[in-house]
Amino acid sequence: MLAPAYGLGTLACIGGRLVGRRSLHIKQLGTQIRNLTDAKQETQAVLLSDITNSGQRTPILLGLVNYLQRHLPSVGFFQPISGPTLPTSTLNVDRHVELVYNICELKGDVRNMAGVNHTEAQKMIGSGKLNDLLDKVYAGYASYKDQREFTVVEGPGPLLGGTELDAQVAAALSTPVIMTINGQPRMSASDYFNLAMVKRQLFADHKAEVVGVALNTVPRYDHAIIMQQLQAKFREAGLTFVGGIPDDPMLSSIRLDEVKACVGAELLFGQKGNGTLLDTEFTDIIVASQRVEELLEILDERRDEHPLVVTSMDRLDIVLGLLAAHVSVQGPSVAGVLLTRAGARLEGRRYAKDTVSRIFKGIEEGGMYRGSLLPVLSVDKPMFEVMSALANMESSILPTSTRKISRAKMLFDKYIDANALIQRLQSKPRTSQLTPKMFQHNIKALCLNSPQHIVLPEALDKRILAAASEVTQRGLARVTLLGDPAAVAAEAKKLGVDISLCSVHNPENSDRLEKYAAAFVEARGKKAPSLGAAADMVSRDVNTFGVMMVHCGDADGMVSGAIHTTAATIRPAMQVLKLPGVSTLVSSVFFMCLPDRVLVYGDCAVNVHPTSEELAQIAMVSADTAAAFGVEPRVAMLSYSTLGSGAGPEVQRVTEAVAIVKKTRPDIKVEGPIQYDAAIDPAVAAVKVKGTSEVAGKATVFVFPDLNTGNNTYKAVQQSTGAIAMGPVMQGLLKPVNDLSRGCTVPDVVNTICVTSIQAMAVKKKA
């Protein structure tokens, strides 16, 4: 049965002849999926994780993207979970997405730079759908980064989920990590180092690799000594330390453009076309409710300051007084004016704005005054609300923060050793290992390109109906449901499921009964029932009817088992779709989806005690199954002995099977007899296996010597490690029929339909 899964379905391959040359259709299909995978692996990426969850990593982000753009023609930026949109956003996207898109002049649709909105992400995590969230993030990431040589990914930790979610995202995207740490006044080098080591282990627990550490806003008074001490500590720990940006007065200041974005204000008066007008800092905030002359006296006493004046919209006398002071070389200086609501909502009241606007325009165009005008912002909010927002403001870098952006890039180039980071990334071994997220995405990409016709016999099951709706709405497959059309439509309506794109066929009064009964009799040969008995069987058993649809070419594949046993699902397929010939063996595999890899286990469900010849056949077809779905086959023929360390009939049986595989299929990388630990662990392999081996320590396909060993091992791995076990997957059938678990979920059914579609494509390629 198919074990409960989150986002991956049963994986299978239709084997051609089990001996001889690898089937051409298997090669072609495997090449398509590997091409998808290889294209993604050639695109490099790195995830920035703020392990202090401060959100203060913008200088490192901008500096890194700027550095990469100087050396690569196509650099991208991706945000797995996007934050709220600023009120002043012109692109209606997250602040960092808009910042990088505009400042770095990135190409393409800006909406593709984010995976999932933070509100949707919160709901998915809160309802226990983390794996669905990661699936959705990966799908967006994979489609975005395909056209770019390097992609910088911003970890969502400060927004949602902390470092743990960063680690889960990095593992899902198979992306190395740069940890960033925001400096604090009383942190020592040991504090920074210990924090980094703890978080590094967290990433390691999630199978995500940390390739470097960078610091931001390190206090200047001990910047030099901390950098020196950390270089030594991280070097000893084998972790690349690329440096730290010291705290900077300009970057830590709050400027008028940030005030505008924070409270959602508009620029009421001043030079609206001048982007630098609001890119200025202020030293203090003065709330002006007094008479103009009293305000001017206060400002005159504070000539060394450059404050922001906040007053209400009905005090345009203050605006005019400050404007006069601003244009005078002798008047006190202010950074700008922020007008708030005066009493009730504005609702059309102008407060002489038109007159004041003409005064500003006259000064601007009159030619007598050539300096910048006083910026006046306006927001229709009560003053207490505005002041509360300003009190909680933190400095940030916006697309309009021209000076901060230039400063951030300069500081990055001066204090961060980006060359060391790139060298570390280049030295990182490139792996062909396929992760579950990559696996799922590749399969669905192929399904979208060539939707297949899949029959689902269990039309009254709510999971089947929901899955049928999803795959047809998404264009992943064409679906026929078996059952009474009125009953199926009523059940779908009750569940609120749209099956308008599905066909519904009733086996009991089908016009195909005569055709299918005759075909069944012919397929069964000497074991065939009478024509009448065959017609009765086809009309009463939905699984038999579905198999006959596949057999006669009216469907490309069948998925069943949500409410039927494995025997009830598979028996009709074994009767009708078994490959001809005495050399053909029907077998099965499980796909074991670990967090960082996909392994193939066979045979864990069908053959109780296979002979040497049968073991060889299982190994060869399992290798083809793995290859067809992008898993590079490195086959380990398992035993309690490793390459002669033990002897006995069971060891000899495996030894003979290995010899048959090597002789029949020299293209397959195979090793055995070998123990499981030596097959999967490079350290154990180095001790137990003498000489070089293409399989030991890095096997991907594990062939067990008998059903007892295989069945118990897959269950032990599944239960002990939390791996998702997909299967059993039948091998050796003419056309695809896949079995579901009776405890399956809607994602299980969706993905099993997709895998069945891939199998159907393989069959058509063979034909």
Image: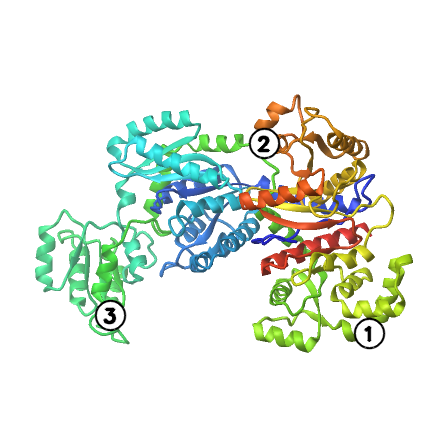
Name which quarter of the figure residue 376 lies in. Answer: bottom left
Look at the image and name its color scheme.
rainbow
In the picture, the disc for residue 511 is 1
Give the amino acid at mark 3: Lys
Q: Amino acid at mark 2?
A: Asp
Closer-to-camera residue (593/235): 593
- In percent of width and height, residue 709 lies at 67, 40
Q: Quadrant of residue 314?
A: bottom left
Q: In the displayed structure, would residue 108 be above or below residue 229?
A: below
Residue 253 position within the rendered picture, expressed as x and y whole percent measured from the top left:
26, 47
- Could you tell me residue 468's position as x and y percent? 64, 65
Mark 3 and mark 2 residues within 8 Å of each other at the beta carbon: no
The residue nearer to you, when weighing 286 against 543, is: 543
Q: Secondary structure at mark 1?
A: loop
Q: For the residue carrying disc 1, how many other residues have a C-alpha within 10 Å: few (<14), some (14-19), or many (20+)?
A: few
User: Which is closer to the viewer, label 2 or label 1?
Assistant: 2
- The residue under label 3 is 353
Write the residue at 65% across / 56% down.
752
